[in-house]
Amino acid sequence: MNLIDTHTHLFVTEFDKDRYEVINNAFNAGVSKMILPGINSSYINVQLQMTEAFPGICFPAAGLHPSDVNKDFEEELRIVENNIETGKFIAVGEIGIDLYWDQTFKEEQKIAFEKQVMLAKKYQLPVIIHVRDSFSEIFKITDKHNDENLTGIFHSFTGTKEDTEKIINYGGFKIGINGIVTFKNSGLDKIVKKIDLKHIVLETDSPYLSPVPKRGKRNESANLIYIAEKIAEIKEISLEEVAEITNQNALNVFGNNLF
């Protein structure tokens, strides 16, 4: 059985001492493909080194994370586009709006998100969207640009039933479920139970959001199995069925770029 981790930051400093071992451990644990969403330009070289070292296993995305948006964001967006033009990146992300920690650059975040959505459409790539305390802002911009050429993932989903319906009705998006679904009081399990599995992809968001029973430790892509097992439990289906359907969902988003 193989799984696809659609969101893992194995290129960050938390993995500097054992990065290749962590990737090998994930592969040996059945995680056959790992998508590496960008944060800012400082990580690009490491992302590319990983994809060169693990061809067919690690795949980079290019994007400016909303928490990294500041007054100089336009220069970062130029770098994002320059990298997309190389053809080495399979998605535009991680992009979005995060109003949880700091709203200093709220308007800049909106502009950066919209411009990166437009880049994705220009280069016919899916987007990987970060939403935190910002569904209304994200939906307003996505409503404006959504058509058959806009696809992607709403990453680390923690929204409501109404939010899931909105995302599904867009037509080209999947919902990223990670370790939060295993947290006892998150309530995400009740939402996931009502979402048809054909709309879900799996992710770890490592090194963050470690699932139970690894909560409190550094997260790794190998832990994807615990998320898949929890979804199988919620849906009352086999682990193999979860793997098969969510893998196909990921392939539907990223297409031939995952081969």
Image (cartoon, rainbow, N blue to C red):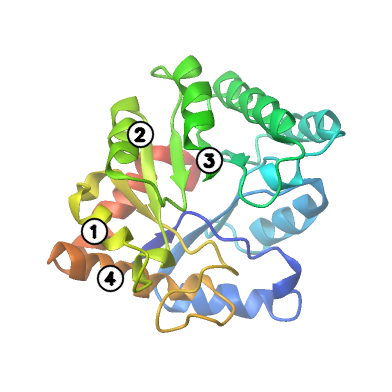
In whole angstroms, how far apart are the C-alphas of marks 3 and 4? Answer: 23 Å
Q: Earlier in the sequence, mark 4 or mark 1?
A: 1
Q: Which mark is residue 129?
A: 3
In whole angstroms, how far apart are the C-alphas of marks 2 and 4? Answer: 22 Å
Above/below status of 208 relative to 255? below
Local secondary structure at mark 3: strand
Residue with the mark numbered 2 = 167
The front one of 103 and 6 is 103
Quadrant hosting residue 123 = top right
Amino acid marked by disc 3: Ile
Q: Which mark is residue 190?
A: 1
> Residue at horizontal 35%, vertical 38%?
163
Q: Earlier in the sequence, mark 2 or mark 4?
A: 2
On the picture, is 245 further left or further right than 103?
left
Where, quadrant-wise, is the N terminus in this rendering?
bottom left
Contact check, label 3 and label 4, Cβ < 8 Å: no
Q: Earlier in the sequence, mark 1 or mark 3?
A: 3
Amino acid marked by disc 4: Lys
Q: Which mark is residue 198?
A: none
Above/below status of 132 relative to 146? below
The front one of 205 and 86 is 205
In whole angstroms, how far apart are the C-alphas of marks 4 and 1? Answer: 12 Å
Contact check, label 4 and label 1, Cβ < 8 Å: no
Residue with the mark numbered 4 = 230
Crowd rating for badge 2 (residues with CA inside 10 Å; few <14, some 14–19, many 20+): some
In whole angstroms, how far apart are the C-alphas of marks 1 and 3? Answer: 22 Å
Q: Earlier in the sequence, mark 3 or mark 4?
A: 3
Amino acid marked by disc 1: Lys
Local secondary structure at mark 4: helix
